[in-house]
Amino acid sequence: MKIGVVCYPTYGGSGVIATELGKALAKKGHEVHFITYQEPVRLDSFSENIFYHEVAALDYPLFRYQPYESALASKIVDVARFEKLDIIHVHYAIPHASAALMARSILKGKGFHLPFVTTLHGTDITLVGKDPGYKPVVEYSINQSNGITSVSQSLKDDTYANFSIEREIEVIPNFIDFSRFKKTDKEHFKKAICPNGEKLLMHVSNFRKVKRVEDVLQMFELVSKKVPSKLLLVGDGPERMNMEILCRKISNCENVRFLGKQDAIEDLLAIADLFVLPSETESFGLAALEAMACEVPVISSNAGGLPEINIQGKTGFMSNVGDFTDMAKNAVYILEDEKRLNEFKKNAFAQAKTFDINNILPQYESYYNQVIKASRPVGSAV
Ligand code: GMT
């Protein structure tokens, strides 16, 4: 197949999934065309089947906001016709689904059929998408998609609850590439961070309010009083400064390190004992799954799709959003007993295995084929 991929090329989970999926499809022999405003960060290796087309939104003194959606739709039209794409897959509805819809209409007028699949990832539904400023366009473009997928059952339910959707949504969960995310021996590094055998807790996010990083800090303060431990905070975003201030307020921060954005997350996960994700909303929680793949149990909230990956009392624990005292209690329970900790680590890995990319990739391939077949114009050649 010749597949177009539209996504956010930066550090967000949807961009990571889109890029890893594209890379895996290319490896299987499909031709994959990324159409984005910047080369996706995870597109770090060369493949003869991968192509990158940059969307350049022209600036002009009249524009207060650059019309990115128009530039994207125009680029899709151009790439689809020239490269003869069979299908386009857009990740994160805003504004990618409406741009694909516009492109499909333009192409139809030129006698070219381009079906598109929209994958719903999270805040495009639960936060931004349902805002009245965007909702009519999001709802319409989802309904007009030739195929719709969501990354969890919880997100599918949220979509039906918040929008008038007349179509079936297919749940295809996020996945892990075990050739990258696996436990490796980094004992020297662990010794440098935890010189006295302390336990290591870790949080990775884009430091937005929904991630509730303040709960990680509050919880760690309680845990470190019971179990000698250290905390690594990975990532950056709007809440970073507030979190550094809070850290200084509640403790002297000597056991907490803010690492900022990091590429080799798997090298950090290799030395972690516990991963913490106390989000307000989380449609899936890819960061938690990556931790589990590296044999790290998870302490999380029970928001959104987290119960679909974190099994209570087996791979970690879940608490109500904001209940950092309960999270601390559960963390201590796991960390204070070495045998118990190892059992949780084993279970986390086994659960992550069920999300192996090799199991999920065929689901996308078969969904693309189904969508292409069902949307083929009557009378067109097969
Ligand atoms: O909102 C974000 O955190 C970024 C967002 C994205 O689309 O980039 O992440 C969402 O998609 C990820 C990949 O499917 C999921 O693992 C995250 O749970 C989800 N984030 C939220 O729902 C908050």
Image: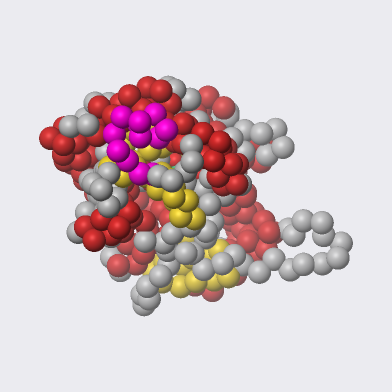
**Residue range corresponding to the magenta coloring:** 220-231
Residue 138 highlighted magenta (yes or no): no
Give the image location of residue 254, x and y in percent: 43, 46
Quadrant of res 104: bottom right
Q: Is residue 252 left or right of residue 226?
A: right
Residue at position x 31%, y 44% from top?
Answer: 200
Q: Nearer the viewer, residue 378 or 142?
A: 142
Query: Up-down: is 279 above or below 239?
Result: above
Residue at 56 percent of width and 36 percent of height: 249
Location of the C terminus (image quadrant): bottom left
Residue 87 is situated, as x and y percent measured from the top left of the image, at 46, 58
- Residue 283 found in image quarter: top left
Residue that lies at the very extreme toward the right in this rendered image: 62
203 vs 22, nearest the viewer: 203
- Asked if residue 224 can be seen in this view, the reply is yes
The N terminus lies in quadrant:
bottom left
Residue 338 appears left or right of 256: left
